[in-house]
Amino acid sequence: MRLIKLKDVTSLTGLARSTIYKYISEERFPKPVSLGERNVAWVEEEIQGWILEKIAERDLA
């Protein structure tokens, strides 16, 4: 299991920081893991799973 920082999440998804946090508040994106007072990261497998879900949704449409 690997944790990735926001810069990597934005790079993988193509989403802006504000969009990622908006989707998190709407429960449409994986929540980050707290690493400290002002430090968070995401589980890479959860981000990859989210991307695969988006691809599957596209293919069903």
Image (cartoon, helix red, strand yellow):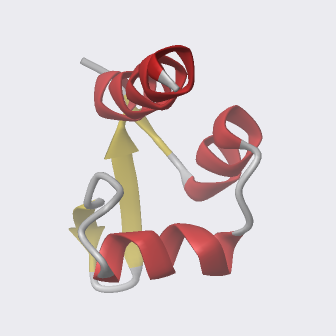
| Residue that appears at 24% across and 68% down | 27
The residue positioned 76% from the left and 45% from the top of the image is: 14
The foreground one among 18 and 43 is 18
Q: Is 10 placed left or right of 50 in the picture?
A: right
- Establish if 14 lies above or below 36: above
Residue shown at 52%/26% (left/top)? 61
Identify the residue shown where x is 54% and y is 67%: 20
- Whether 51 is drawn above or below 31: the answer is above
Task: List x then y, in percent, for residue 31.
Answer: 25, 60
Q: How many marks?
A: 0
Q: Position of residue 23 (x, y in %)?
A: 43, 70
Q: Quadrant of the N terminus?
A: top left
Left or right for 28, reference 12: left
Q: Horizontal and vertical percent for residue 39?
A: 40, 71
Quarter where residue 3 is shown:
top left
Left or right? Give the position of 38 relative to 55: left
x and y, in percent, of residue 28 in the image: 32, 61
In terms of depth relative to the viewer, which is nearer, 10 or 7? 10
